[in-house]
Amino acid sequence: MSGVLETHDLTMRFGGVVAVNNVNFSLQESELRCLIGPNGAGKSTFFKCLLGQYRMNHENGRVLIRGNDVTGWNTFEIVRLGIGVKTQVPSVMNGLTVQENLWLSSRRIHGWHGASGAVAEVARELQIEDLLRRTVGELSHGQRQVVEIGIVLVQRPWLLLLDEPAAGMTGDEVERLIGIIRRINQTASIIIVDHDMEFVRMLGSTVTVFHQGSILVEGPAEQVLNDPAVREVYIGNRAE
Amino acid sequence: MMNWPSVDRINWGWFLLAVGIFALLPLVFDTHTATLLIIWALFALSLGIMWGFAGLLSFGHAAYFGLGAYTYAVAVINIGESTLPFLLSLLVPAIVAAIIGGMAFYGRISDVYLGVITLVVTLILFKFMSATAGDIYKIGSARLGGFNGMPGFHTLNVPGYPDISLWGWPTYYISASSLLLSYLVCRWILARTFGRVLIGIRENEERCELLGYNVAAYKTGIFSVSAAMAGLAGCLFANWAEIVTPSVFSLGQAVEVLIWVIVGGLGTLIGPILGAMALGYVKLLLGEQTVIDNSLILGALLIAVVLGLPNGVVPAIRRIWNAARLKLRRRVSEGSTRRTLNASSQVNR
Ligand SMILES: Nc1ncnc2c1ncn2[C@@H]1O[C@H](COP(=O)(O)OP(=O)(O)OP(=O)(O)O)[C@@H](O)[C@H]1O
Ligand SMILES: [Mg+2]
């Protein structure tokens, strides 16, 4: 049985830099997976390849999402399969209110009449009801992260790609986020990129370590985080 | 009711006031001048909706204005009756814009290049039309006429009656209605999902793509609508001037409309309309004097506004107006609380 997401020999080059190098990755239905790796390991680029944000063809390998070979598809077509994306730098509509941001996301899934109801529901879920009328650009980094997560959740995706969702959040916000992730994970598969070992440990999922565009190790959190090779990569990188 | 404050709901009171002003203006103002100002306003509105709300800048919007004018002239010379030429003058620019925009947006060309491409198209059309003096440059029985342009075509007639020509004050009322209707169309677009997604694209194109919207299709759509509106303005201009020359594609025309929109206020619909009318009027007044060069004065005005009111005049006025209203309301509500306090103390007594 094929998984939710599979890549075959996925490769992405920028000039001489091989940002993603022959990655064979697979994710099962309802799986939670953490993707870690030092700066520049290729994690964000990996996401962008999955989403067709970089032009892909079969020389870059293949991306299969629920059995569809999406290599070469447009981003919006891939997303429409039911994928929610949170980018590393919060990608929100800064000039609009929180309500408007959520509505634009909600509208595509729930239609003109259902959009507002779904927005209200997500706002309650994330406890951001009192922010709805605020302009997103005025919010703190952490709040904007929450808004972006709301934008993702309101579409009720079955696959979520979250690039550093906890960055800039306070301890409370992170704890709430973990609760939310656990709950979504009951019905959706999730890949989370993060640097914060503590956060990854708390999630306690399978961990994939990227290093120089390739998968270095993959396994249960405790085992991977104690792996000498992983420590080497991280510490070696820090020392630079 | 859906709350979407960044797109103002239409205020029908103001709209009806505008209808009234346009209806009565010929009593106090020369319609010939007023018609031209209205045509410019429509042209500015067409750029304003696409630039201010979808974030798409077309440096060469004059191309669609000019195409509208030429399409009308060529078609009406061949057909005689004006209804179809009128519709074609919207349709041809819309199709050309859809092709150019479609290639640019689906080809993922960045928005800056779109601006440049449209400008180049305008310049090419200017060069080409200027060079069509020879007899071989004929479309049907319409001679393009090179630099001297195409004079002597039928102006708009009552639909179905080619002999009943609408010229003079009817041109004024047709232009005014076109402007008001186009304004309503813009408002309607902005109140629909289509317009809201455009605003989303202006704010963050990547996000809209990641929400599953076909950004290229939305951009092509608004580009095409905007070009149709510019074409309408061009058609009316042809009727007003009774001649079409390559100057409709000139660089001056292309730049002027940008200034009108910026000064009036980007991101509003009223801004471009008022900007075009006010600056257009200033230009006409200045045209009668020879002391200072016109473009110098317009340029100085532009710089003054950009430095002093970076969002344009209309948003600045709106801010002051809203602040004043808020203050007034606060004062009124303070007064009423004081009154209720007095009342309740009296009851207590
Ligand atoms: N558009 C681009 N053009 C050229 N090089 C790029 C581009 N995007 C990424 N790179 C390079 O590709 C490599 C991988 O970058 P990427 O952003 O995917 O790393 P990352 O693992 O997400 O790092 P971080 O943890 O800092 O977010 C880096 O060397 C980066 O400099
Ligand atoms: Mg990254």
Image (spheres, helix red, strand yellow):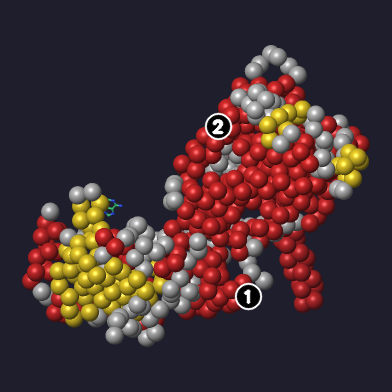
- The image shows residue B149, relative to residue B81, as above or below, that is above
At a point 69% along the width and 13% down the height, the residue shown is: B291
Residue indicated by mark 1: A113
At a point 64% along the width and 63% down the height, the residue shown is: B192
Q: Is residue B2 left or right of residue A195?
A: right
- Counting from the top left corner in percent of width and height, residue B142 is at 73, 33
Q: Quadrant of residue A110?
A: bottom right
Q: Secondary structure at mark 2?
A: helix
Q: How many marks?
A: 2
Amino acid on which disc 1 is placed = His
Which part of the image, by quadrant, shows the C terminus of chain B?
bottom right
Q: Secondary structure at mark 1?
A: helix
Q: Are marks 1 and 2 in contact (CB under 8 Å)?
A: no
Q: Quadrant of residue A24?
A: bottom left
How crowded is the residue under tag 1: few (<14 C-alpha within 10 Å), some, or many (20+)?
A: few
- The image shows residue B150, relative to residue B12, as above or below, that is above
Asked whether the viewer can see residue B185, the reply is yes
Label 1 to label 2, Cα distance in Å?
A: 47 Å
Q: Residue furthest top?
A: B291
Residue indicated by mark 2: B124
- Counting from the top left corner in percent of width and height, residue A156 is at 46, 77
Numbered tag placed on residue B104 in the rendering: none
At a point 12% along the width and 75% down the height, the residue shown is: A226
Amino acid on which disc 2 is placed = Ile
Label 1 lies in what chain? Answer: A
How crowded is the residue under tag 2: few (<14 C-alpha within 10 Å), some, or many (20+)?
A: some
- Counting from the top left corner in percent of width and height, residue B126 is at 60, 29
